[in-house]
Amino acid sequence: MRIITGLAFALLFAVTASANFASKIFELESGSAVQTVKAGDTIQTMVFKTQNVGTVTPYLLKGLHCDCVKKDKAGSCTVSGRIPAHTAGGDYDMKLDVEGSINHSIDEMWLKITVIPMSSPIEVISGSKDQTVTAGEPIDTIVFGFKSGLGIDANFPKGVDYSYDVETHTVALFGTTKESLFDNEYDYEIYETDEAGNKLFTVSGKITVLHTPSETSIETIENATQEVIAGEPIKPIVFKYANAKNMSIEGKPICIERQVNSNEKTLTLTGAFPEDHGDGEYTIAAIALGPDKNDTAYATIVVKHKPALVDLELISDNATQTVVAGESIDPIVLKFEGSPKIRAEGVPVGEFLFVTNPDNKTSKFTGKVSPTTVASEYKVSFIAQGDLNSDTVYATIVVQAPSSSSIAESSSSSSEESSSSIESCSSTEGSSSSEESSSSAESSSSESSSSSAESSSSAESSSSAESSSSSSSSVESSSSAESSSSAEESSSSEEHTTVVQAVAVNPLHVSMEGRLLQIAGVDYADVDVFDMQGRPMVSFKQVIGSVSLEGIRQGNYIVRVRSGSMNLTRRIVVK
């Protein structure tokens, strides 16, 4: 832009008012036609009132512009803009050529701008380079002028941006900070560069944002409590938060992942526990960290171990074997998979046990058949029960009668038993109970102390298994602490096995309901009732299900129930 000098500017401006324009009017309505402006800054806007004006041709400094608006014959022209920041200091004369719309004569309107140059390569033209605002509020626009190359290193708060104006050699920082911002300081740097991009001159600034006081909260909105099987994915746990600047998780297992959605203000936990994970319970705390206070929400995951499918195989070659009553069977070896509870059903009466080796997953079934067991073929079922399924294998134990001498001895013993009194039968029951180590202490004490019919169920398990020579029994394997001490002593320390004493169960059950004697476990039975001195009171033959004792006075009695080779003797109370 050339500098026009030596003109009588004031005189020309005064004459221009309206007299010399004949029928056209172009006069200053607001602003000043003579101004002093710092390089890089905006001029004071000048507004001209026009009438009968055709064309206005401006000759202005770069960065300034003239905009005219016409309505019928009247109108206005506005001169505004920014002086380029790299403009040299001095007086600048500018003009507007105004052509009339009637006679088309052209007159000149002169303007004068005195420019004050920048004293350094980069300067703040307007606004403060260091500002403090509350989140949600706009910053005051900051304008920097620069003479040559420019670079910016900045971490502006969200909502604040900048723009270059190449024509005026300025850069402006502007915008409204986000309401969600928390206390923070945002530093920025504006610098001059040479052609190689090297920093030559630097101006630094800082925008400090203060949070808007708010209530921080968090709640569990989905699956606050759940139970899951190891290996299966958990149901997504969703927390909803508000006004939190950060999130923290406590008690989260490493296999559970977190995802934060800042748009929806949610925290989601997903994942799965390993398949070999055992039972456990986890309480997870999600903490919303706020600018003024924190809040916490909780979720609970109960993990259950993954049940394994059980499998059972008989691996010894003695699935079918013969044994003499009173002697031990050949051990039957079972191979299992999973963690089953193994039991045997259909076992001949005797004393049997399982010896389990968890290392090689085998269980050995061994024991001794009772001398009084009836010679017969017994089909034994070995059942492995797991959480999801069960598996069964079978073996056959053929029991043979003992030798003639053993039979004679057994007959003599049997003969003595039959001639004994009811009192001795009662005491025999007690001794039988003590001989069978499988009977529980609770069952034994229940029989010796109870005087009511209601306690009959606990006493039944202690009845003589030896007298039940034709019945089969059930044997169960367990690794719990309830195993008897004698069984633990017999376990192999090398194999780390657990031994459980077998239980022979008499199927006969007797109970009293009022004056009705209930009999269960057999199709029919003979019933004999004695007084406490052993004197016969009444007998019933072929009783099915129950028999009435209405004809007997109230008091304590001994009842003997027989069905085939099985019998049960116990005390009852008739009320």
Image (spheres, rainbow, N blue to C red):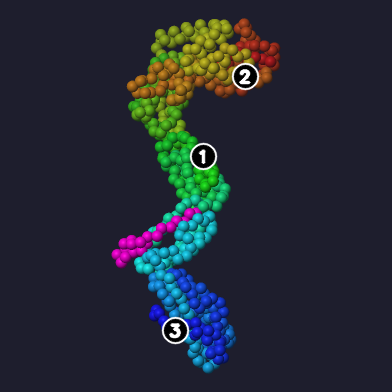
Residue range corresponding to the magenta coloring? 191-209
- Residue 400 image offset from top left, x and y in percent: 41, 18
Residue at 44% x, 8% y: name it: 408
Residue 300 got which mark?
1
Residue under circle 2? 454
**Is residue 184 a member of the stretch shown in magenta?**
no
Quarter of the picture holding the N terminus: bottom left
Query: Does the magenta stretch mainly form a helix, a strand or a loop?
Result: strand
Task: Using the image as rendered, state which of residue 43 and residue 517 is in the foreground.
Answer: 43
**Is residue 208 a member of the stretch shown in magenta?**
yes
Give the residue type that dot 1 points to. Thr
Give the residue type that dot 2 points to. Glu
Q: Residues under labels 1 and 2: Cα distance?
A: 45 Å
Residue under circle 3? 7
Quarter of the picture holding the C terminus: top right
Image height of 249 relative to 385, above or below = below
Q: Quadrant of the rendered structure where residue 297 is?
A: top right
Q: Residues under labels 3 and 2: Cα distance?
A: 133 Å
